[in-house]
Amino acid sequence: MKLHKILSLGVFGAALVAGSASAEVRDIRIGVDVPYEPMEYRTPDGELTGFDIDLGNALCAEIGIQCEWVVQGWDGIIPGLQARKYDAIMSSMTINEQRREQVLFSDPYITPPSAWFAPGDVEIGTPSEETLDGLTLGVQRGTLQDNYVTDLYGDVADVNRYATADDMVLDMDSGRLDAVFLDFPIGKSTLLDSEAGDYKVVGKKITEPKEYFGEGFGIAFRQRDKELAEAFNAALATLKENGTYDEIHERYFGAD
Amino acid sequence: MEALMTWLEAQLADNSIFTLQTLGYYGEGLVTTVQLVFLSLIIGLVLAVPLAIGRGSRHRWISLPIFLYCYVFRGTPLLVQLYLIYYGVVFVEGIQETWLWVILEKPFVPALIAFTLNTAAYTTEIFRGAIKSTARGEIEAARAYGMSRGLMLRRIVLPSAFRRALPAYGNEVIFMLHASAIASVVTIMDLTGAARFVYARYYAPFDAFLFVAAIYLCLTFAILYLFRYLERRLLAHLKPASG
Amino acid sequence: MIDLHGYGPRLAEGALITIELAVLSLLLAIVLGLLTASAKMSRSWLAHRIGTLYTTVIRGVPDLVLMMLLFFGGQIGINMVTDQLYERFGWDIFINVNEFVAGVITIGLIFGAYMGETFRGAFLAVDSGQIEAGRAYGMNHWLVFRRIRFPQMMRHAIPGLSNNWMVLLKTTALVSVIGLTDMVRVAAEASKATREPFTFMIIVAAIYLLIASVSEWGFARLQKRYDVGYREAD
């Protein structure tokens, strides 16, 4: 059943070995962790959609290959890439040094800030060691937000770590969390624009320091798949020039 | 040997995972795990004694509900019980406004409730078995002395039942220690929670999980030896007489 | 009827995965248990040591920790091997430890240790005169095992086997934590989406109780079969 997939990947591997300068890039599979609205999520009938999905599909179309999306939990997403479960990760993954030791990144395709979100009735001043003292804060385990909050506020606040953004939102809905730290577009879509409750942004959007927030989101490949990464970089540049990128961006983040 | 030493030195020098910060997490995790297991075992034990006596009652309206409670809590996964209590309490209408929320808000208490109810069910069955196997002669002797039911229970049946239950209860303690690992699922930073944190941060599954496995192994051995010691002390009279 | 918000079919699929996982793990555990029991009873010092190490370590560490170690670590371990193959020989091999396989291997490995103890006790309970009698008939080692030791051992092993199965069944719930969509995971997702944790968790609990009750009945029948020729001593 899966044999033909294994074989085709084997052929794909062989093609990469054989291919030198004019590498022929074959159809690939892309790993993604859902839901992470509006970057990647499912419509009610189960269809994958979101900024990453649309941009990924546009990139594949530009390169002239077929792309298949594979859903994978965040915990195992990098091991899954190395195990050749899929050939790339396009799942709101921030480019940083720790990850660069494991994978090869494309050029950044979007650089969203992170931000604090809290229930409307919770009064928090500009986030700092004093204002967050004694509060319960939520982050998704293993994300850059986890690293940032743990290092800056881990000593003064309780940090609850969740496997998915969903679990975290549920616990904030039920009043177990005082604030969460999220990628801004995700917080905007799942908290500010949702029916679930009354939420607000606390403080400014945060993009510094670079050692935590990296250089933006990148597509991750296996270290050795350099041709593949270059093909995606070239396609990304084309889409930015011809306006396709802006069109997709506007679809999910509005005109501003 | 020489090569081994240099290899070891290189490993320690190049150690970016077991920093003071992560060792601190493991330390706090150890404290949380021990608290959670110890408290649930103590409260579970206190609940189990009357339940075990009631379980053997001749009145069905006492014994049947206890039987059902044990059957359900022993027949379903602890994880399901934990989810039910952790997420269940949230949807009780208006609970956030009551004083109860102050303790149920943190994951510790919901987890403690789930663990306690679970271990109480198992312990009840262990005690019931031990009470049932009380030697008939002991009971007859107590009756002959004119002891009341309560006095007999207190002086004769329970003390000997506790001793007989000791080996099985030792297993239950180890079982609870291992079962407590699921506390990390509801964001508690117990030992396993610390290991998951280290894994996610450094992508180092072997370091993170082997280290925590070793700690659990040590705890298991400590419990094992404690119960062996207790058995030697308390069950000496049951040993075959040495020639 | 209870409103399942359309989660009914997925819940049924999840229940099927739970059962498949439990049965496959049980089979693996029985094989490993028999091997372990033989190793521990073996006259070979090394086999005995390995058997003891296996049962001690496995029974001293939480199931969930072992599962994460195998699931997250196993994949990386395999990757190291396949990366070496690729670098040295240019072989691009694809070995994927998916959640289901990792679950079966981990649970099988854990309960293999418990089964080992069960089988060892049961083998020791078989009257050695029976084995000698078999040898005297000229039966070889394998034939003695198949015709005499195994069937009689099973009579003693069934209570332990039944007990291990019940615990194993509940242990399968842990795979939901590493990402396998068994019925606990489906129920957890459904509870969060519909905000009705009681409905889904109670259904799942009921399914577990149902499976446990059915298998209890099955083991009682099995016990009867292997009890042929014996009568309960008073």
Image (cartoon, rainbow, N blue to C red):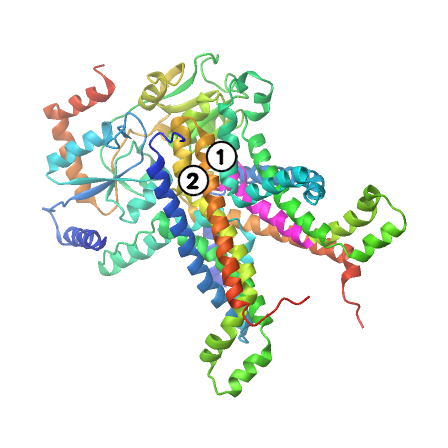
User: In the displayed structure, would residue B84 be above or below residue C212?
Assistant: above
Using a 10 Å C-alpha cutoff, classify the residue at mark 1 as few (fewer than 14 neighbours), some (14 to 19) or many (20 or more): many
Which region of the structure is painted magenta? B167-195
Using a 10 Å C-alpha cutoff, classify the residue at mark 2 as few (fewer than 14 neighbours), some (14 to 19) or many (20 or more): many
Q: Position of residue B231 (x, y in %)?
A: 73, 56
Q: Position of residue B235 (x, y in %)?
A: 76, 57
Q: Which mark is residue C16?
A: none
Q: Is residue A214 visible?
A: yes
Image-based side of B239 in relation to A77, left or right: right
**Residue B176 lies in the magenta stretch:** yes
Q: What's the residue at 56%, 26% (across, down)? A: B104
**Quarter location, residue B64:** top right
Q: Residue beneath label 1, please?
A: B83
User: In the displayed structure, would residue B18 be above or below residue C80?
Assistant: above
**Dot 1 falls on which chain?**
B
**Dot 2 falls on which chain?**
C
Q: Which mark is residue C184?
A: 2
Q: CA distance from mark 1 to mark 2?
A: 9 Å
Q: What's the residue at 41%, 20% (across, down)? A: A116
Image-based side of A193 in relation to C52, left or right: left
Q: Main secondary structure of the magenta part?
A: helix
Which corner quadrant holds the C terminus of chain B? bottom right
For the residues labelled 1 and 2, say whether their Cβ atoms are less than 8 Å apart: yes
Specify the amino acid type for callout 2. Answer: Val
Image-based side of C84 in relation to A58, left or right: right
